Amino acid sequence: MYFSFAWRYFKAKKSTNAINIISWVSVVAIIVGTASLIIILSAFNGFESLVKSLYSSFYADIRISAARGKVIYLSEEQRKKLAVWPGIKAASVVAEENAMLTNGDIHTIISIKGVDSNYRYISGVPEKMIRGNFNLGTAEEPRAVMGVGIENAIGILSDRAITPLTVYLPKKVPAGSTDPLSSLSQGQVLPSGSFAIQSEFDNKYVITNIDFLKTYLNYQKDEFTAMEFMVSDISQESEIIRGMKSFLGKDFLVQNRYEQNESLYSTISLEKWAIYGIFSLILLVAAFNMIGALSMLVLEKKKDIQVLQAMGAEKTMIRKIFLCEGILLAIIGAGGGLIIALILYYLQTHYKLVPLQGQSFLIDYYPVKLVFTDILLVIVTVFLIGLLASWFPAARAARQPFELRN
């Protein structure tokens, strides 16, 4: 019943054209605000999914590292038990260190990561190769797979390299050693291919054979930097981590992919809420238009209010009618904004209306991804703003004095 009154008031011709104009301006503002917020959140979700997929190509589902220091000690028995842990699909041991890579007179600082043969099953790097192949060689004849940024820095094409590159590495030295040169080792690796994932990895990492790297780092048999895992079912990840923590004790960190990149994911989440807050201001501006339109409508319908009061309508009923008027404006605006956003989403995903400038990115158009919870959040936000904006005019309408005239 209340919405019936509200609809009649909305579509009825007003005595003053300004009321109609302001009403439609408020509706258009809500449409624009709703569509903008949904589109911006969808674009943000698209980039977020892209970034997460890039990071998941390099980082493992679960990683065991040292709680303090850099090196972990895992016996062969521990490694075997962890490798067949319930829910684990593949496991790989890792040795990682900062180093200097040289090609003649050209030098660059890198992070060199030594991995075993199982690494290809837990990492997406082999699928991101753009030159050569994912060949890490042996301890005696080590090969190296590097990011395209490293290739550019040292001036080679890894699939055509015939001369080994020199790697300078820090190494563990016996206690009491006073020779500074004893803390530095020098090895050679032959490039076998390059990968392209994301600049953070492409400009930093070189992947090689773990036995070669451990030899030059002077690591013992049971010394590693980390052990990485792929899980069979991601829903079991928390249970697996709890079990591993209990098995290994407090000297080890057992982290999922989120915890390995906590600052990244926290920043992404914070940015999304900031975007939501900023674009909600558009809807608040529309709310001021709505307050003006409803306030003028109350003055326009002053006689109608008195007729309803004469017929026995209580103040609560009058208030609800004008509250429904504001909610109706919000519903029309939110519905129109949602339709426009869905149309633009379809056009962007199918026809790539908005391209990305430059040729260096992995995709050539702005990625978008609709998330139902985001749409629901926007609709609820519009509904609440419409409710709040109509509260004051509705309260004013309910306070209209009841006058009987002869």
Image: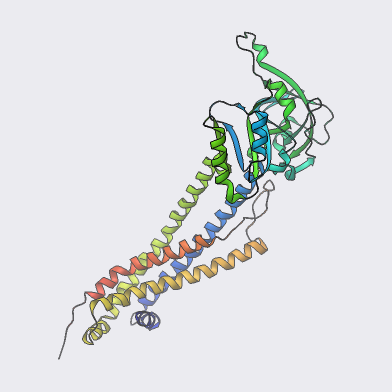
| Residue at x-position 54% and y-position 42% | 264
Left or right, 354 with reference to 211? left
Q: Quadrant of residue 207?
A: top right
How many marks the image carries: the answer is: 0
Q: Identify the residue at horizontal 54%, vertical 65% (top origin).
A: 341
Image quarter (top left, top right, bottom left or bottom right) of the C terminus: bottom left
Relative to 405, is 318 above or below? above
Give the vertical position of 152 relative to 102 (above or below): below
Which of the 4 quarters of the picture holds residue 62?
top right
325, 139: nearer the viewer? 139
User: In the displayed structure, would residue 67 be above or below residue 51?
Assistant: above
Q: Is residue 111 visible in the rendered structure shown here?
A: no
Name the residue furthest bottom.
406
Q: Position of residue 18 (x, y in %)?
A: 36, 75
Residue 52 in view (yes/no): yes
Residue 150 appears left or right of 67: right
Which of the two residues, 374 or 33, is positioned nearer the viewer here?
374
Residue drawn at x 65%, y 40% as measured from the top left: 229
